[in-house]
């Protein structure tokens, strides 16, 4: 997926100015407040207020010292009691969602979807924990300000920071978008190493401070191997909780099949993306359906399916970069939403979705120990099972296993062995290994 920003420095920074400016705006005139000098290392502004006797008081929101919310932002530093207000009484318990690369383009689309309730539902209050880099700090404040100004009822907390050990505290979802993009002349092995370091650190941070059942969706490229590195550095979190985002590829495949068949894309189901989120991925038309019928019975042009369709999906990201001048952001955000929803709502009967998950115990004969996109179903509890009844023919088996995508992921894994605790890295990446955006 497209890349937001590199989270390289893990120094502690805290944000006070907006808290102060917010609070100074909102404190009624008849109150007297002292704003002590802030020190950079202080956790929170200490604000003491006194109200003169007999004065009308009880502001709508009790002004108080913020609880120990690390780096809470502006209006989100206020405390509240969800059970105290009639309209929020029936709401579910607040969930913590961490997002890395939070000042980037993908996040800019995603965060507002999360905050609006369209992802987790209209009765699910959320806390957004935004991870940025030192370089993106200002932008991150801008994001937090826009979230403030949007007045989303379900958005109860926003905190920003650059230390994953703080930002990932109690996270129940971690959407890891931030990664360094491959620059001109940069070897893929270098990219794997640079981004691998980030995801190793974030894996350790999740392991230390996140919820034990945190669901992790890795978006930053190369997302399959980044997810593997993250997972290997978080041994106390179940391996199956780690995902690499291939839902965008699934959506792209559905669109192309619909276009060819002349139907709207809601008629296309059972599309699997096998393997790596790279140009070696295998979009599976053999098991896919249009209006409940096998795609190969509807689109009888096998050559088109094997060649044009497959390549279009594999390289869609690159074509988009040529048009836009940057990689996909809005459609990536939409596909992250789809990926989350696929895990928190029961999969429609007979259908499935694609996600990159750990291959240990897979029923397809795919090499173990890698993160590979496969067909999954969920009963809506955040978990998934691999779909067993899929058809393979020689073409599909060959494309998945022997030809490239599995070999590519195994090579990437060898290349990051120093980051997964599996010994010394040996980088023998196939020459043509490319992200969808690299053409
Ligand atoms: C995409 O699929 O759109 C992105 O992953 C492309 C890229 O390489 O950034």
Image: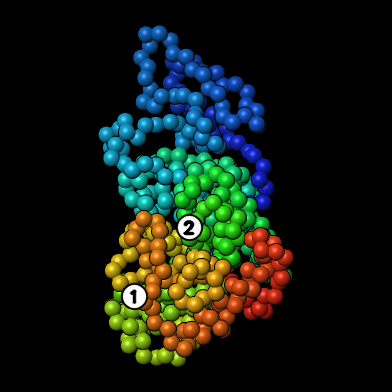
Report which quarter residue 235 is drawn in: bottom right
Colour logic? rainbow
Please say if the residues under marks 1 and 2 sit with CB atoms less than 8 Å apart.
no
Instruction: Identify which residue is drawn at 46% across, 76% down.
Output: 364
**Residue 241 circle label:** 2
Q: Is residue 17 toward the left or the right of residue 78 in the image?
A: right
Along the line of sight, which residue is nearer the eye, 252 or 244? 244
Along the line of sight, which residue is nearer the eye, 421 or 120? 421
Q: Which image quarter holds the C terminus?
A: bottom right
Q: Position of residue 34 (x, y in %)?
A: 55, 18
Report which quarter residue 298 is drawn in: bottom left
**Residue 282 circle label:** none
Q: Who comes first in sequence, dot 1 or dot 2?
A: 2
Q: Position of residue 372 (x, y in %)?
A: 52, 70
**From this viewpoint, which residue is outermost toward the front?**
361
Q: Is residue 178 toward the left or the right of residue 377 in the image?
A: right
Instruction: Identify which residue is drawn at 56% across, 21% down.
Output: 35
Q: Position of residue 27 (x, y in %)?
A: 46, 23
Cα separation, mark 1 vs mark 2, equals 27 Å
Report which quarter residue 326 is drawn in: bottom right
Residue pointed to by mark 1: 268
């Amino acid at each position: 997926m497209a890349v937001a920003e590199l989270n390289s420095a893990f120094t502690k920074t805290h944000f006070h100015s907006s808290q102060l400016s917010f609070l100074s705006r909102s404190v009624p005139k008849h109150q007297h407040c002292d704003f002590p000098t802030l020190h950079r290392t202080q956790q929170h502004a200490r604000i003491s207020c006194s109200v003169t006797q007999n004065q009308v008081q009880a502001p709508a929101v009790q002004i108080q010292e913020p609880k120990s919310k690390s780096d809470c932002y502006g209006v989100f530093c206020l405390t509240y009691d969800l059970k105290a207000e009639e309209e929020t009484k029936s709401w579910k318990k607040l969930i913590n969602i961490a997002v890395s690369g939070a000042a980037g383009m993908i996040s800019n689309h995603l965060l507002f979807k999360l905050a609006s309730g369209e992802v987790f539902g209209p009765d699910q209050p959320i806390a957004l924990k935004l991870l940025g880099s030192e370089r993106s700090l200002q932008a991150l404040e801008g994001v937090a300000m826009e979230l403030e100004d949007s007045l989303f009822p379900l958005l109860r907390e926003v905190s920003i920071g650059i230390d994953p050990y703080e930002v990932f505290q109690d996270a129940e979802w971690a959407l890891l978008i931030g990664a360094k993009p491959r620059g001109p002349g940069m070897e893929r092995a270098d990219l794997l190493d640079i981004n691998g370091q980030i995801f190793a650190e974030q894996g350790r941070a999740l392991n230390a401070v996140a919820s034990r059942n945190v669901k992790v969706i890795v978006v930053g490229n190369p997302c399959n191997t980044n997810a593997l590195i993250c997972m290997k550095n978080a041994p106390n979190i179940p391996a199956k909780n780690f995902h690499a985002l291939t839902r965008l590829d699934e959506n792209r495949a559905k669109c192309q099949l619909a276009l060819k068949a002349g139907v709207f894309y809601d008629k296309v189901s059972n599309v699997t993306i096998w393997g790596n989120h790279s140009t070696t991925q295998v979009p599976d038309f053999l098991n896919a359906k249009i209006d409940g019928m096998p795609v190969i019975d509807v689109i009888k042009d096998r050559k088109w399916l094997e060649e044009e369709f497959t390549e279009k999906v594999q390289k869609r990201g690159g074509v988009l970069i040529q048009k836009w001048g940057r990689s996909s952001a809005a459609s990536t955000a939409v596909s992250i939403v789809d990926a989350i929803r696929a895990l928190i709502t029961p999969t429609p009967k007979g259908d499935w979705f694609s996600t990159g998950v750990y291959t240990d115990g897979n029923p397809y004969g795919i090499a173990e120990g890698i993160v590979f996109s496969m067909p999954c179903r969920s009963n809506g509890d955040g978990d998934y099972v691999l779909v067993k009844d899929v058809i393979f023919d020689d073409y599909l088996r060959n494309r998945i296993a022997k030809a490239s995508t599995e070999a590519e992921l195994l090579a990437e894994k060898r290349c990051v062995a120093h980051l997964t605790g599996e010994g010394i890295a040996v980088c023998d990446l196939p020459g043509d290994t490319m992200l969808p955006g690299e053409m």
